[in-house]
Structures are given as structure tokens and as C-alpha cells.
Amino acid sequence: LKWFLVLFYIVAISFELIFEVISKVIPQIKNDTPDKLTYLVYVIMFLLLPIAYYLVRNQKSYQVKYIYFISYTLLTLLNDVVTFIDQPELYKGGNTVEIFWLLLAPIFVNKPFLIVVTIGIIAKYIIVGLIIKTPLALLGIVLVAIFSLIAFIILNRFQSYVKAVKTSYDQQLTGIVKGVIATLELKDPYTRGHSERVASYAMELAKESGGFSDEELKAFNYTCLLHDIGKIHIPDQILMKPTSLTKEEYEIIKSHTVVGAEAVSKVVGLSNNIDVIRSHHERWDGQGYPDQLKGEEIPYSARIAAVADAFDAMTSTRSYRSALTVEEAYQRIVEGKGTQFDPELVNLFQKVYPKWKKIHKISQENRDADFYTNQAF
């Protein structure tokens, strides 16, 4: 986006300056009807810079390109109409900046934006042609169609390349995550399958909420898988203790949230969802840890993970207790509405509960199969 803005101003201003210089050297090409609103167009475009800065700072940078294109197109449309309405024979078509829009639009690897640019410029030529009644507008439409085709070809190449890179990155990240989970399960056998089940439960709840894009769900899934990564630093005698923990031991256990968050804080693709790791033990009533966050102070993704983690913890056998049935765990989640858990998420949990039962059943069958396989050997 930064490069796009820099290039936009360079191309737009240099086009005007170069044309002025050439027209002095070759007077024959000088425009006898200078654009009446040229300076106003560029003054307004420079006034958009603070708006662009504000949007970038507020995580809405995707809107900047649309605002710039729509503003520039509407301003140049007004300029063409005001300048040539009384003398259409002097109209010479569009300008270099419109070619810039078409050929640089693919750098965003965003097909909707390229479609908006194509339709917007064609619509501008149609309106100009109808208002000032000049056949040259048809030539502009043809040129836009040609350059749009080139831009779409470039965009498809970009998309293929980006897709290949993303696939490779996802495969590497998945391998790393699975390796970390395997290491954690070797340290604490009682957590075998826990990370995968928590991620599966949380994904169903996140999808039901409707508040996540596909890319956000993918990153959310990775961090759910790693929500207990900090337990790697917990001493075995505490992690595997078959009796109740002392106050000091419990404080050490609680540190796994902070340690885990710090461990992945620099990992690209995970850092944006670090709240899942740090805050999945926070409670709606503010009695959780490590930061005693309360209500909506707790990040939404962490609130989802908290429900999933609690459900799986209750339905799993641990060194110090047996597993509860899914029905008992369901009842305890409902009873925790407004105290331990986000009330709205508990309502959503009740909707997805049948899917959670199915996930638990499949996981239990797999655990039983693994047990009998190991017994056979």
C-alpha cells in the first residue's frame, strides 16, 4: 500500500510536469484547452493522505485503495465534463494515471479491486462520452478493456505464486505445530489428544459465532493447538502429580499461559492470536489468570478457547481424577454461564453441543483403538 501511494503521486505529478516540459519544446502538442480543475484534483488527492494514515493506523488499510480510486475517478470525470462540455472536439481521451490504476491494481492480489477499477474507468468513459458527445470515449473504453485483460493475466500469475507460497508456509507451520504438540504429549501423556480436541471444539464454536474469516480461523486453529505450549517448562513432578497441588505448585502451573504466549510472540502467523494462549484461563467474573481480566476485557478468541478447554479437561481422565461424562460437562458449562464463561458463548455452545459430542465420541474411539493396539504389541 505504501509503494502504491508513493507511485500514485509520482506518476500523477510527473505526468503533468513532463507534459508541460514537452509542450514547451514541441508547441504543437500544447493543449489549447487546459483542464480547468487539474490543480483542484491534486489538492484533494493530497488531502486524502491524513485519511489514508488514519485508516492504516486503525487496521482498515484495505479501504485506502478504494477511496483513492473512487475519489480520483470522480474528480477527473468532473474535470473532463467541465473542461470539454462546450468544445468536445478538443477532448483527447484519458490520462496516464488511469493506465497506472489498471496495471498496478494486481499488486494487491485482490480480484474485486481490479474489477472495481475496470468497471469504474469504463463507466467514466461512458458518462463522459454521453455528456460531452465525443466518439473518442469509445477508444478509451477499448484501451481500458485491453489493459484490463493484461492486468487480469498479471493478477492470475500473482495469485498462483501467492497460493504456492501460502501452501508451503501452511505445511511448514503445521509440521512445527504437530511437532510441538507431540513433544508436549511425551512430557504429559494425560494430555494426549487434548490440544487437537480443544482446537476442534473451539473451531466449531468460532464458526457458529460468524465473526471469523477463513484466514482468521486458520490462525485461530493453530494457536488453539498450541494453547498449552507453556506447560513444556513445567517440572514433571508438578505436571504429573497424582494428588492435589500446593499453592506454590499451582502458581507454577498458572505460569504456563505467560510462558506459552512469550514462546510464540515472534512467530509469524501466530502472534496475532497470542491472546488464546495467554488468556484461555481468564474467567468472565474476573477470577481467572494470569491478568484477572473481566467480561469483554477478555479477548473474544480466548473466551472461545476457555469454553473448549474446560469441556475437554472435564471429559478427560487426569492423573488426579477420572473423566466426567459429556452430559455432566455440558451441565457444568451451562452452570458457569456469566461466572466462568461468556453468557453469549454458552448460548452458542448449547447450539454446537451435538457436534462436540460427535468429536468426543470419535476421539474416544481412536483412544480405545490405540490402547488395544498397544496391548497387542
Image (cartoon, rainbow, N blue to C red):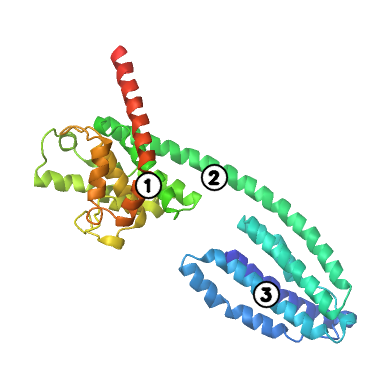
Q: Is residue 149 left or right of residue 234?
A: right
Pointer 2 or 3: first along the chain = 3
For image coordinates 78% across by 82% down, the residue present is 81
Identify the residue under disc 3: 72
**Are the two marked residues, 1 and 3, in contact with CB atoms closer than 8 angstroms?**
no
Q: Amino acid at mark 2?
A: Lys
Looking at the picture, tell me which residue is in the foreground, 193 or 93: 193
Quadrant of the frame with the C terminus: top left
Question: Regarding mark 1 in the picture, which secondary structure is present there?
Answer: helix
Pointer 1 or 2: first along the chain = 2
Looking at the picture, tell me which residue is in the foreground, 282 or 146: 282
Question: Regarding mark 2 in the picture, which secondary structure is present there?
Answer: helix
Q: Residues within 10 Å of mark 3 (few under 14, many from 20)?
A: some
- The answer for how far apart the CA atoms under marks 2 and 3 are is 33 Å
Residue 120 in view of the camera: yes
Identify the residue under disc 2: 166
Residue extending farthest to the top is 376
Q: Which mark is residue 351?
A: 1
Q: Amino acid at mark 1?
A: Lys
Residue 264 in view of the camera: no
